[in-house]
């Protein structure tokens, strides 16, 4: 709990301010462990919008690139491997998704 000193008319008074007590806690960030289903689903939906020619599936677990920023590796057969970056909020809601082809399939 935070305390504030208030001086008025030459008298110092100590006040406890419970509303500010939560400000000392670090912000909660979403982790890959509790958001895997949301992130994988968003990655697959993003890939479906690219018009895949074959099967698409998530390969492995998401990798954390920073607070609330996860990368999913999606394989398209045939087609190659894509990195799908997913930004989420602290409640695992998807904020944005971007795709980038990592390796095109060689013929």
Image (spheres, helix red, strand yellow):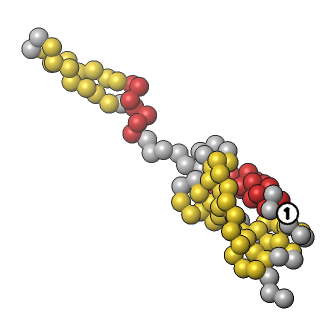
Q: Residue furthest right?
A: 54
Front in this rendered view, residue 11 or 92: 92
Q: Is residue 49 above or below residue 28?
A: below
Q: Is residue 98 left or right of residue 104?
A: left
Q: Is residue 92 visible?
A: no
Residue under numbered circle 1:
51
Task: Please name the residue shown 39% across and 25% down the image.
Answer: 18
Front in this rendered view, residue 12 or 59: 59
Task: Please name the residue shown 75% across and 75% down the image.
Answer: 81
Q: Is residue 41 visible?
A: yes
Residue 5 spot, x, y in % from top left: 21, 24
Residue 14, image quadrant: top left
Task: Please name the residue shown 34% across and 24% down the image.
Answer: 17
Task: Please name the residue shown 68% across and 68% down the image.
Answer: 100
The kind of secondary structure element at disc 1 is loop
Front in this rendered view, residue 22 or 102: 102
Residue 102 spot, x, y in % from top left: 69, 75
């Amino acid at each position: 709990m935070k305390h504030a000193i208030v001086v008025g008319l030459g008298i110092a008074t100590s006040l406890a301010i419970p509303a500010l007590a939560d400000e000392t806690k670090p912000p909660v960030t979403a982790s890959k462990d509790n958001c895997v289903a949301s992130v994988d689903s968003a990655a697959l939906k993003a890939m479906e919008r690219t018009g895949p020619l074959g099967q698409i599936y998530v390969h492995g677990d998401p990798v954390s690139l920073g607070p609330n920023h996860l990368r999913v590796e999606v394989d398209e057969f045939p087609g190659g491997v894509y990195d799908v970056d997913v930004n989420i909020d602290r409640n695992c809601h998807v904020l944005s998704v971007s795709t980038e082809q990592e390796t095109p399939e060689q013929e």
